[in-house]
C-alpha cells in the first residue's frame, strides 16, 4: 500500500494496477502494445500517455479506463483499489 501523502499527489488511482495487469498479461504487453489494444476499444492515447498513467502523472478518463480494462481482459473493478472498510464493515468512501 502506498503512503497517504503519495496517494494525494497521484492523478489517478488505477495506474499501478494497470502496470501490474499489463505485466501479468499472457504474453506480457508492452506499453505500446497496451496502447494499440486500448485504442482499438475507443481510447485515444499514445504510449507516453500510458506510461504517465501507470506512474500517476496523468489523469485517466472513464472511457480510457474501460478501454484499458477490455484490452487487458480484466473487469474495470480489478484496476481499482478496494475501498477501506470501517470498524462496522461499511465502505469509508461516500
Image (cartoon, rainbow, N blue to C red):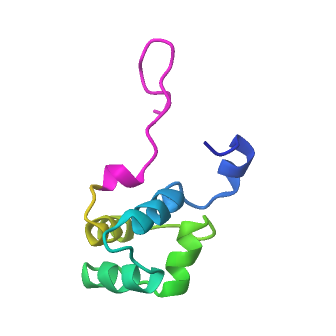
In the image, 22 versus 70, the foreground residue is: 22
Q: Position of residue 69 (x, y in %)?
A: 31, 64
Identify whether 48 is placed above or below 24: below
Specify whether residue 93 is painted magenta.
yes
Q: Position of residue 73 (x, y in %)?
A: 25, 65
Give the quadrant of the N terminus.
Answer: top right
Q: Residue furthest front?
A: 27
Q: Position of residue 36 (x, y in %)?
A: 34, 86
In the image, 73 versus 11, the foreground residue is: 73
Q: Position of residue 84 (x, y in %)?
A: 50, 30
Q: Going 60% across and 64% down the picture, which residue do you hit?
A: 56
Identify whether 94 is placed above or below 7: above
Q: Going 55% across and 84% down the picture, which residue do you hit?
A: 48
Q: Residue furthest top?
A: 88
Q: Main secondary structure of the magenta part?
A: loop
Identify whether 44 is placed above or below 59: below
Q: Which residues are magenta?
A: 76-94
Q: How many marks?
A: 0
Q: Going 39% across and 77% down the picture, which residue do you hit?
A: 29
Specify whether residue 3 is painted magenta.
no
Identify whether 11 is placed above or below 48: above
Q: Going 41% across and 68% down the picture, which residue do you hit?
A: 22
Q: Is residue 10 left or right of residue 34?
A: right
Amino acid at each position: 500500500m502506498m503512503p497517504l501523502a503519495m496517494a494525494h499527489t497521484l492523478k489517478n488511482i488505477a495506474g499501478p494496477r494497470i502496470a501490474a495487469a499489463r505485466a501479468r498479461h499472457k504474453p506480457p504487453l508492452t506499453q505500446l502494445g497496451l496502447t494499440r489494444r486500448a485504442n482499438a476499444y475507443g481510447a485515444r492515447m499514445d504510449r507516453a500517455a500510458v506510461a504517465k498513467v501507470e506512474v500517476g502523472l496523468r489523469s485517466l478518463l472513464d472511457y480510457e479506463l474501460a478501454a484499458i480494462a477490455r484490452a487487458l481482459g480484466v473487469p474495470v473493478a480489478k484496476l481499482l483499489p478496494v475501498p477501506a472498510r470501517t470498524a462496522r464493515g461499511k465502505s469509508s468512501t461516500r
